[in-house]
Amino acid sequence: MKKINYILVTLVFFCSTTISYGQQESTITQFKSLLSIFNPAAVSIDSTTQININVRKQWTSIAEAPSTNIVSFGTHVRENVGIGFSVLQDKTFVEYSTFVGVDFSYKLKLNESSDIYLGIKAGGDFYELNTSGLETYNIVSDPMSKTSSSFSANVGFGAYFKRNQLYASFSIPRLLPYDRAEIDGNETTSSKTNPHVYLMLGYDFVIKNSPFVIKPSVLSRSVKGSPNVLDINTMVDYNHLFEAGVTYRTNETIAGILQLHVNKRFSIGWVYEESNLKALANAGKTNEFLLKYTF
């Protein structure tokens, strides 16, 4: 039974990777609440202090399916200076990847209503390929499929612009390529990741004499040699008590989002996501849970 689960998750994962245009970094639906993961400039927007915990479980019908765990922290240490850190852990079948980063941001005041934040991220990737539980059919084992681990230092940068209800973000969180395994047919090969570019644009429409705020946004993920993937998101905020909305991802994924603001400091978020791709028809749904605390 374990062997069957390994085969199923391998097939689904690599079909999904191919259809998702080779994107190699983590996909997070609640990206607005976890923006410092992608953009170090966002580590202390509005001079707040926050800690976020996010858990993403993909394809609930398949054992050993991909999962992502995130912890991030950001605070301001001076009027215009912010610092923070983040830990992002991905597990996909036999691959384990953990990125640890430290963020620094500086705010420049352009005028009374406009600010721009500039940020630097420094850290590294801890990567492990653990094939000890695999069963192969070849008499001669593939030397690239042996259990291995490595560490790759990395740096990134970002910028975040805010003017009243308008905001825009540009970032490359990992500038340097790093090694990872890929499966091509029956062979396991080593490859290098390419830098991913993230662009985001959003606007909060405040409806006069109404408790509702409509918050549309678009996130673009792009990497060399692959088409862009867009997250088109719209959230509706009711009197700062809760938000509900939907995200459409251009690799044929749709998600419903609900965030409950328990009080001024503590928020809970939940995502229910599914794909329209035939390759993932029996893979099950994806769930994402967020805990956010503002000091």
Image (spheres, rainbow, N blue to C red):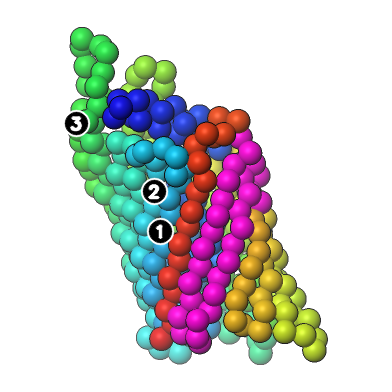
Q: Is residue 240 shown above or below 274?
A: below
Q: Nearer the N terminus, badge 2 or badge 3?
A: 2
Please identify the residue farthest to the top as the structure is shown: 139
Percent from the top left, x then y, of residue 277?
61, 35
Which segment is the magenta one?
248-277
Rendered image: mark on residue 132:
3
Percent from the top left, x then y, of residue 125?
30, 50
Mark 1 nearby-residue class (10 Å; few <14, some 14–19, many ≥20) = some
- Contact flag, marks 1 and 2 (Cβ < 8 Å): yes
Marker count (numbered): 3
Q: Judge whether residue 256 can be spotted in this image.
A: yes
SS assignment at label 1: strand
Give the labeled residue for mark 1: 55
Q: Judge whether residue 142 can be spotted in this image.
A: no
- Quarter of the picture containing the N terminus is top left
Q: Please report the residue visible at 59 percent of the width from the left and 62 percent of the height from the top.
A: 257
Left or right of residue 164, residue 81 in this image: left
Percent from the top left, x then y, of residue 280?
54, 34
Q: Please report the residue visible at 60 percent of the width from the left and 30 percent of the height from the top.
A: 278
- Contact flag, marks 2 and 3 (Cβ < 8 Å): no
Task: Quote the CA–CA distance across marks 2 and 3.
Answer: 20 Å
Mark 2 nearby-residue class (10 Å; few <14, some 14–19, many ≥20) = many
Left or right of residue 109, residue 28 in this image: left
Magenta span contains residue 268: yes
